[in-house]
Image (tube, rainbow, N blue to C red):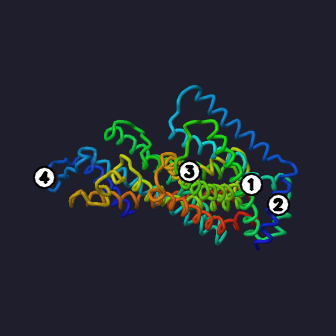
Amino acid sequence: MIWKIFLFLLLAFVSVAGISFPIVENPTRWYEFPLIPGLEENAKIIFFHVPTAWLTVIAFLMSTIYSFKYLRKKNLDDDVKSYAAAQLGMIFCILATVTGAVWAKFAWGSYWSWDPRQTSIFALLLIYGAWFALRSSIESEEKRATLSSVYSMIAFVTVPFFIFIMPRIMSGLHPGSADDSNAGPVVNFKMNGNMQLIFFLSMIGFTVLYFWMWNVGYRSMLLKEKLDKKLIRG
Amino acid sequence: MNKKAYSLFLKDFKSELRTRYAINALAMFIIVAISVILFSVGNEKISASLTGGLFWVVIFFTAMSGLSRAFVSEEERGTTLALQLVAAPTTVFSGKLIFNIILVFAMNTVIAILYSAMFEAFVIQNFLLFLTSFVFGNIGLAVSSTIIAAIIAKAGAKGTLYPVLAFPILLPLILTSVQLTLFAIDGISFERAKFELAIVVSYDVIMLTASYMLFDFIWKE
């Protein structure tokens, strides 16, 4: 219980700090952020947009890990865990796309410009969508679990290309693309000390939030299955 | 193992030649697709880069229309069980893969020839680059399409689900191949396109490995 309170306080602090701390040329006080050339005011999205994109990849990774476990042990609980992870992954993927599009309106002038990173998050949305479509088309439980696990693993092979390779080698508008002078504010640490701190706190807070949501999600699904079976057996 | 895979391929090939369902349907589909593009473009002058992109659109949709037959026809005819008894999973996959590779090469050669005939802007300046990207792109297309065909053959909604599942998997290949086709049209030298070629070749290798490793799980009930 206590860690939930901590999580709430952490995320509240990160949200308030991320939105309200001013961005100035030469930060002197502890609550000021530096000016990153090219981003200026809209750099604050980094505290919310990057964690959602990061969580999409983490969720997909976990979905694939549990798919792999299912293929080895054929334990349907692993399939439920994989499903819970994929549900959350889909939500965070939509959030990353939307926050990115909103930021793009301010930074580049239009919501969608088929920039490589926008294309790759869209491809990730398609992968998730296809996975759910496949699952809903199969009746039998074991077959559904087996086929969706195989598809998840095949799709995961393309994910590192989409998220880490393609947007950095192709020329585009997003920070960190081949056009940019560096690898982006996250990898090249254009942020100063306290901005980095808020950023990492945000990442940690969101990750813990994800694991908590996933845990609650799969436990409730497992309990529901157990109750359904009890009802049927009477 | 290779002999068995080859004889499986021969079985499919001969039955296809006898009935010619797939070949006719695919040929008509190619003609229809190119006609639709011609009609929609009308008298507009389209740039060379646009024809390069449209080339891969036709390839993708023809592949989606024709490549699932390898496994779906077995399910429809009820011969899956016999196939499971007769050969090991890797042999079955190899046989189907050879069939699909031959089909993809035949299909894409026809598309390329028709395309260059219909669109004057589609002129390849660096033919060696085009040929290399053609060969490796086709292999990648065949590998990914075959494994996804195996998945949907066991699922329910075969026709509609196939492009939905295959598109995200094929996307890295399509993006890079379009880039390479544009390079070939513009006459970019082989040396400068090595990076994109490396991506396509690695895609082929990775998908081939993943498909062989995962096919066992799909095939065994």
What element does badge 2 sit on?
A: helix
Numbered label attached to residue B174: 3
- Asked whether the residues under marks 1 and 4 belong to the same chain, the reply is no
Which quadrant of the rendered structure holds the C terminus of chain B?
Answer: bottom right
Label 3 vs label 2, nearer the camera: 3
**Picture coordinates of residue A43 (x, y %)?**
28, 48
Q: How far apart are marks 1 and 2 (CA)?
A: 10 Å
Say few, some or many: other residues with alpha carbon within 10 Å of mark 1 (under 14 / 14 to 19 / 20 or more): many
**Three-letter residue code for mark 2:** Thr
Q: How far apart are marks 4 and 3 (CA)?
A: 46 Å
Numbered label attached to residue A26: 4
Chain of the residue under label 4? A
From the viewer's side, name the closer residue of A182 and B121: B121
Numbered label attached to residue B153: 1
Label 1 vs label 3, nearer the camera: 3
Q: How far apart are marks 3 and 2 (CA)?
A: 31 Å
- Asked whether the residues under marks 4 and 3 belong to the same chain, the reply is no
Among the 4 quarters of the image, the one containing residue B133: bottom right
**Picture coordinates of residue A192 (x, y %)?**
21, 58
Say few, some or many: other residues with alpha carbon within 10 Å of mark 2 (under 14 / 14 to 19 / 20 or more): some
